[in-house]
Amino acid sequence: MAKLYSEKKSVKNLNELQPSEETVNFLLNYSKALSVINCNNMKFEALLN
């Protein structure tokens, strides 16, 4: 799933970036399932799926 983006691409306008619907749905579902637990001075991340 990991991709390497080593080449820099010039983007004239950030409004030109159009993510696919699949990408948007993946990020939304990931953010809904992510839980961050603060305990003392530590943070624990858990995926609740």
Image (tube, rainbow, N blue to C red):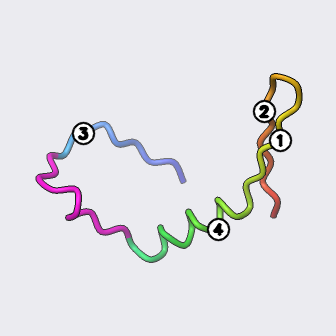
Between circles 3 and 2, the one closer to the viewer is: 2
Q: CA distance from mark 1 to mark 4?
A: 19 Å
Q: Position of residue 22 (x, y in %)?
A: 49, 74
Q: Amino acid at mark 2?
A: Lys
Q: Going by the picture, which residue comes out furthest to the top?
A: 41
Say if mark 2 contacts mark 1, CB within 8 Å.
yes
Question: How many numbered marks does the figure carry?
Answer: 4
Residue 43: numbered disc: 2
Residue that carries the numbered disc 4 in the rendered image: 29
Counting residues from the N terminus, which is met first, the one under dot 3 or under dot 1? Answer: 3
Q: Quadrant of residue 44?
A: top right
Residue that carries the numbered disc 3 in the rendered image: 7
Say if mark 3 contacts mark 1, CB within 8 Å.
no
Q: Position of residue 34 (x, y in %)?
A: 73, 54
Residue that carries the numbered disc 1 in the rendered image: 37
Q: Nearer the viewer, residue 29 or 22?
A: 29
Q: Secondary structure at mark 2?
A: strand
> Where are the magenta residues, as a range?
10-19
> Alpha-carbon neighbours of circle 2 within 10 Å: few (<14), some, or many (≥20)?
few
Q: Residue at x 81, y 26 (%)?
A: 42
Q: Is residue 31 left or right of residue 36?
A: left
Q: Residue at x 64, y 68 (%)?
A: 29
